[in-house]
Image (cartoon, coloured by chain):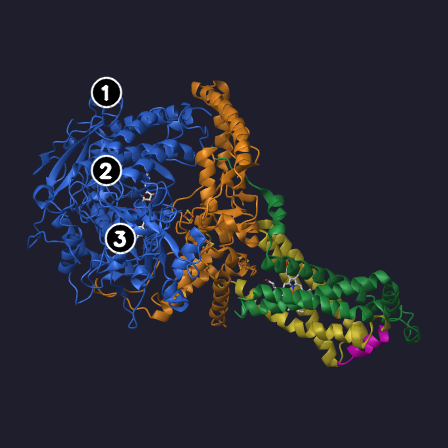
Chain colours: A blue, B green, C yellow, D orange
Amino acid sequence: MSQQSHTDGRTYEHDVIVVGAGGAGLRAAISAQEAGADVAIVSKLHPVRSHTGAAEGGINAAIRDADSWEDHAYDTMKGSDYLGDAPAIERLCQESPKETIQLEHWGMAFSREEDGTVSQRPFGGLSFPRTTYAGAETGHQLLHTMYEQVVKRGIEVYDEWHVMNLAVTDEPEPEDRSCHGVVAYELQSGEIAGFRANDGVILTTGGMGQVYDHTTNAVANTGDGVAMAYRAGVPMEDMEFIQFHPTTLPSTGVLISEGVRGEGGILYNEEGERFMFEHGYANNDGELASRDVVSRAELTEVNEGRGIEDEYVHLDMRHLGEERILDRLENILHLAEDFEGVDGLEEPMPVKPGQHYAMGGIETNEYGETCIDGLYAAGECACASVHGANRLGGNALPELIVFGKLAGRHAAGEEYGEPEIDTGRRGDYEDAEFDSPVPLGEPDEGADATAAADGGETITDGDAVLERAVERETERVEELLVADGVNHAEIRSAVQDTMTENVNVFREEEGLEQALADLQEARERYRDVGVSDPSRTFNTDLIHTLETRNILDIAEALTVGALARNEFRGAHWRKENQIRDDENWLKHTLISWNDGEPELWYRPVVLEGEEKRYEPKVRSY
Amino acid sequence: MSQSHNRGLIEDFGRWREFRAGMWAWIFHKFTGWVLVGYLFTHIAVLSTAIPASGAEQAVLQAGDDVYTQTIVTLEELLLVRILEVGLLAVAVFHILNGTRLLFVDLGVGLDSQDKSFYASLILTGLITVASVPTFVGGAL
Amino acid sequence: MAERYSSFTPGGTMWLLQRVTAAFLVVVLAFHFFLLHFVNHADEVSFLASSARMETLSYYSLMVLFLVTATFHGVNGVYNALINQGLTGRKKQLIKGALILASIVLIVQGIRTANAWAGGFPL
Amino acid sequence: MSTQLPQQSDADAEVESDAEEAPSKGDLRRERKRQRAAEAEAEREAEEGERAAANENTREILVFRFDPEVEGKQEPRFDEFHVPFEKGMTVLDALIYARDHFDSSLTFRHSCRQAVCGSDAMFVNGQQRLACKTQISELSDPVRIEPLPHADVRKDLVVDMQHFYDQMDAVEPFFDPDELPEDELAEQRQSRENREKVKMSTRCIWCGACMSSCNIAAGDNQYLGPAAINKAYRFAMDDREGEDRTEERLEILEQEHGVWRCQTQFSCTEVCPKDIPLTEHIQELKREAVKNNLKFW
Ligand SMILES: Cc1cc2nc3c(=O)[nH]c(=O)nc-3n(C[C@H](O)[C@H](O)[C@H](O)COP(=O)(O)OP(=O)(O)OC[C@H]3O[C@@H](n4cnc5c(N)ncnc54)[C@H](O)[C@@H]3O)c2cc1C
Ligand code: HEM
Ligand code: SF4
Ligand code: F3S
Ligand code: FES
């Protein structure tokens, strides 16, 4: 097979290229097309395989007369522990009702009330039962409904094309750069091709759960979009805020819905103690305390030697009675049986905390724009900052449809007013004083830097930039395919181990520093990585190797953020300073990739809403 | 490049060991249906000897010496034919019973116990066939 | 995209007829077997006995109907089975023609036989 | 079965002749790499044997291997792996273990690990199953894992799904009501009963297990297949769509290769990991179609 057949691949050209086909990507594509653009979706998975399909709970939307978007915004801001940006939060809450009903108009099979209207249910942290749902499979219904609309509109989908990099010009300042397309690798054929985007590229690559070894996220959630944008110059925002869900099955990370505790399920440690009460973690709410509290309690039990098999605790629902369980929690029985081999009617279910959601991501404003011209992001990979330090259940799905739509329209050329949230090093920001105990970033400095740093000339022409990007990626693949070296799986599991060990629910300085050292070592090893499968057909070995690089970059930024933020806010807990420190930390963490090295800086939170300012209050429920 | 492995018919059919009730029912119904059509054609062919026979003298007919009667009697004298007839009965009975099962399925009745009704058809076919052996194989040879 | 259906398609009709004939056949086939194997034993068959039965109009018409339905049911079944195996295009048309021809021959031959017994159409 | 595009053979021929003319550097390197891969393979097998002997609690999996490009894998074969058993281990876990520890070229689709993405339907011990939803403790040793039957194998356990997707697209799989409420904040009403009726049909995750298990779909490439028919059912039965639209949907289903091809084999219903009563839905549509046709008379 000649090398040629793979490198001189075609270039595909569209107005808007959407990377990813989860809820956010599909919504972005539909709205870009409605705004008149020729749009194409490029996704490493077929759209219906996206992880949006896993969401169970529902979509928060103030659609009832007794409810209001202002209340939703208030709840969200409070839930975020005052680290969300008000303009983004208000956008979310204002547009969510319309977008949710839009889904209904597209036929989504929501659960219904007697009078035929869609049902809503209460969810943690909400002052009104505004979580609109479709059984326990809201995400599945949402994803499929939207894919149906994509089919209906004949939007082009390139599925099983893994996007490897962005084609971004290389002006010295990221704020001056522009994005002109992406480079992607087709799994089936091994073809590497350029996708020219005349108007814009929208990243919607979803979560990054694979940074941890125990997660509710999919294997494909490797944060590719975040890492690509990061290396192209867009800062990562608030990466240290990771939500851990307290009840996931130990062997797979499959989520056991909060519903079990809601119905009266009880958590026990190895000694059979109901530790939430007996050890005083939450004397009022017990098992029903908020996610971060329960997660911390479980881990404390395990760390103090009262965990079962030193790993997990038991979630018992047997006392609810077979009838009630079958009626309301049938799905849970299947999950426990299928994924853990446990019969929830006969024995307690093993559970432990697992990574669930990344609050942080690609820095964007309230329209989904990044600081690079022509580059947008939406969905879990983005951080317009609606979730701040802690996401409320049911707030991610509205984020997909609202910001997906806005980014799509914007990329297709529709004008919005001046954004109120700044991106990049513009407006108000401060540089951080941060001394890393270990070297960070690329071991051989500059390897991944822009052409300017390579000594080449600065390219600012769109086609040339894309061409160069394709060449580079082709070279990279060729090198990986022939290199004899370390297996990506070893590196990946080293990263996951240290992240789970040191950057988990509990974080302390020593552990975080250890993690940075381990990550640096992993980076060293990654230099010798090699792909042992020589095939051009469906080479997942290669894809996983590429993804591992992204995981490395993200894990590092996440740890740097966690080490810098010495306070306890939302999901981020620090041993050294177990209080929320509004005086010093009412600001976003931003990390930029600066010629192969992460650079930390901060931006104040925007608490000014359209009409009022959200004053930080104590977060208690 | 985009080559792929087509496993072909042989491998597909090699999976018969992994068939489940509904598939067996399908295969059997198919097979019995084909046997029945085959029989229908031969049956009419054999019966057609009645056409030349109808031209025969009344006496010949009385004596049963006509082509038609002779053909049938000769055939019936062969044990093999008798045994084949039992087979035919089995085939027909199965086809009828399973056909009835299918009719119910088409009406949306008893879909949940489709495997049980298949087994029931099989067992009943067996019973009826065994019960009919004396009538078929016996009788004046 | 699979090709769109345009005008009235016989697909459903044939399917329905296959079921209707099947339901009819259950009754008649059972009767036929019973009459010719249990009531009258097969080895006792003779031209005259057959002839005697065939001379009644009701029996004659039942048998002709039986023949027609069985032929339709059987041949349509075979045709369906072939389509299920992916028979298409020219080959399909050819086989369809052949099957129709065979059915006609079968039915004509059957009726001639019946007429032979009945000594013409029984009136 | 032959979902392969005809022009591909030409493309292959071209590539081959290219390669013959001047074996590029890349080819040479790849050649060496293949050799190394073969050596590593031998080593791995030896190691694995030792491991198996040392560890009592392992499970043996037999995995179908095929790669059109890699020498030694062009002829389909089965590879044997011994993976340490853990409570709760699924077939997918076993495959991941084998890939990460023994042979990183072992290829299969998977993503969610929780039976919602539909990537990993496979033929495991004689039945179409989702690897991630199948406890290995429930299977007899050795666990035999093959790609979905009746689909072209691309590599190892990866099959070509394009044909399946085409069939899904053929039924116009999208909601299409006559009219919508004027107020963009007003929902269309749907009764609970009606939602209940379509509920099961909306659960499909496009895994293709049903299609693979159906002998009719195997024989007749044009047959819409159970999943696509079920998708059409989901809309045809939804009261929010208008009557004319429902009729159009029935017309699509009534094509020669539509619902009539189904011979009620039930295997689709049996293998569906989402417990969708596929046969029932298909049968209901047949009756609806007949009723609809009778109106013409
Ligand atoms: C178990 C679970 C339950 C949840 N429940 C809820 C809930 O009840 N309510 C709620 O609001 N939220 C919930 N969430 C959160 C929410 O579901 C997710 O945040 C959201 O679905 C993410 O959607 P997305 O479109 O951003 O990404 P995804 O749906 O993950 O899609 C990512 C897409 O990007 C593509 N992609 C990734 N990398 C590349 C690449 N390199 N090249 C090309 N394509 C690429 C993938 O193929 C995929 O199509 C839940 C999450 C989980 C895991
Ligand atoms: C006596 C009652 C009978 C019943 C209830 C019956 C029922 C059925 C039914 C329901 C089918 C359709 C199966 C499907 O499409 O899924 C069928 C198919 C068939 N029947 Fe019958 N049938 C009967 C008698 C006969 C007779 C007498 C013949 C022979 C002439 C016959 C030959 C066939 C054939 C060839 C098929 C097609 C089989 C295939 O799928 O390949 N049947 N039958
Ligand atoms: S109907 Fe069931 S088996 Fe078929 S594709 Fe859908 S989920 Fe899979
Ligand atoms: S297996 Fe096939 S024949 Fe019908 S019942 Fe299912 S589609
Ligand atoms: S991995 Fe998603 S269905 Fe099995």
Residue C51, position as x, y percentages in the image: 82, 76
Secondary structure beneath dot 1 equals helix
Q: In the image, is residue D224 part of the stretch drawn in magenta?
A: no
Secondary structure beneath dot 2 equals helix
Residue D291, position as x, y percentages in the image: 48, 71
Please rate how many residues cluster around mark 3, counting C-alpha atoms within 10 Å: few if below 14, some from 14 to 19, many from 20: many
Q: Nearer the viewer, mark 1 or mark 3?
A: 3
Q: Nearer the viewer, mark 3 or mark 2?
A: 3
Ranked by sequence position, the earlier of labels 1 and 2 is 1
Amino acid type at mark 2: Leu
Q: Verify CB contact (< 8 Å) between mark 3 and mark 2.
A: no
Secondary structure beneath dot 3 equals helix
Please rate how many residues cluster around mark 2, counting C-alpha atoms within 10 Å: few if below 14, some from 14 to 19, many from 20: many
Pointer 3 residue = A294
| Chain letter, disc 3 residue | A
Q: CA distance from mark 3 to mark 2?
A: 22 Å
Amino acid type at mark 1: Asp
Pointer 2 residue = A558
Give me the disc on residue A454: 1
Along the horizontal axis of the image, is A24 left or right of A127? right
Residue D209, position as x, y percentages in the image: 49, 51
Please rate how many residues cluster around mark 1, counting C-alpha atoms within 10 Å: few if below 14, some from 14 to 19, many from 20: few
Residue A30, position as x, y percentages in the image: 28, 50
Q: Which residues are magenta?
A: C45-56
Residue at the (21%, 29%) spot, across then down: A169
